[in-house]
Image (cartoon, rainbow, N blue to C red):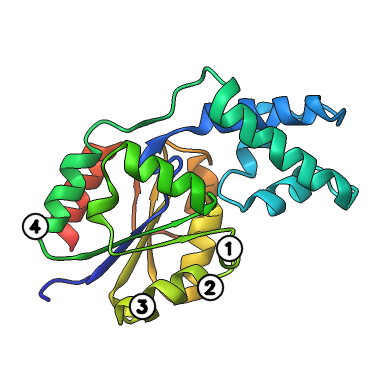
Amino acid sequence: MAGKFDLIVFDWDGTLMYSAARIVASLQAAGTDIGLPAKTDEQCRNVIGLGMHEAIQNLYVGINPGYIHRFADRYRHHFLLGCTQPEVLFEGVHELLQTLEQRQLWLAVATGKGRKGLDRVLQQTDCSRYFHSTRCADETSSKPDPMMLHEIMNELDVVPERTLMVGDTVYDLEMAQRAGTAALAVSYGAHERERLHSFQPLACLNNIDEMKQWLAANI
C-alpha cells in the first residue's frame, strides 16, 4: 500500500461517537444506586476510555471488590435503558470511513467498551462493514496497556511504524506510545487538549472535518 500508514485504529466513544455525557450520567447513576459517594462530571470523564473494572477502581480507589459487579450491572442498565443523554455518531463519520475504505486502508477499533456494547453500536450505526478488526476491554487488557494494539497489528500483519492510533483520551495516546505506533488526538471528546498534548500526538484536531483533512494530507 502507498502512503505513510497501512492501518488506522480508532477509539470509539468520544472519537467516532458522541457518548461522553451518557457515560458520565450512567456512571453517576450507578454509584447512587448502590450507595457510593457522588462523583463529579470531571471525575467521571477522566475514566472514559478505561475498561469497566478499571474505571470503577479508578473512580473509587480501594473499593470493595464485591461492589464492582453490582456497579457494572447498574451502569449497563442506565446506559442501555435509563439514560436520556444522546449516543450518536459525530457528523461526517460515515463519509470519513468510506473515504478511508476507498483508500484500501486497514481499519480497526480499540475501545474500552465491552464486546456486547461495541457489537450493538456497530450494528445500530451500520459501521461494522468498515472495520477489519476490533478489540474490547473485556476480551483483552484495558488501555493504556498496549495489548489491544499488538493484537490488532498481529491479526492484520501490520508493523507499528505503519499504524496510526486515533483517540480522545490520554489512555489512547499512552497505549499508542507503549505500542510504538503514531498517534492522532481529537479535542472534542473526553479529555482536555492540554492533557492530550502531553503525549505529543502528531496533531490534535477539533472535529471530524479536520480529521478528514488531516488524514487526506498525511496518509
Q: Which residue is mark 4?
A: 102
Q: Which residue is mark 2?
A: 147
Per the image, label 3 sits on a secondary structure element best described as: helix
Residue 102, position in %: x, y? 8, 57
For the residues labelled 1 and 3, the Cα–Cα distance comes to: 19 Å
Per the image, label 1 sits on a secondary structure element best described as: loop
Q: Which residue is mark 3?
A: 155
Q: Amino acid at mark 2?
A: Met
Question: Which residue shows up at 42% across the image and 40% down it?
Answer: 187
Q: Which residue is mark 1?
A: 144
Q: Amino acid at mark 1?
A: Pro
Instruction: Between label 1 and label 2, give the one nearer the viewer.
Output: 2
Left or right relative to 72: residue 64: right
Question: Which residue shows up at 29% across the image and 51% down it?
Answer: 128
Task: Mark yes or no: residue 151 visible.
Answer: yes
Q: Residues within 10 Å of mark 3 (few under 14, many from 20)?
A: few
For the residues labelled 4 and 3, the Cα–Cα distance comes to: 21 Å
Of the image marks 3 and 2, the number of the one nearer the N terminus = 2
In the displayed structure, would residue 33 be above or below residue 96?
A: above
Task: Mark yes or no: residue 206 visible.
Answer: no
Of the image marks 1 and 3, the number of the one nearer the N terminus = 1
Seen from the viewer's position, the closer of residues 106 and 176 is 106
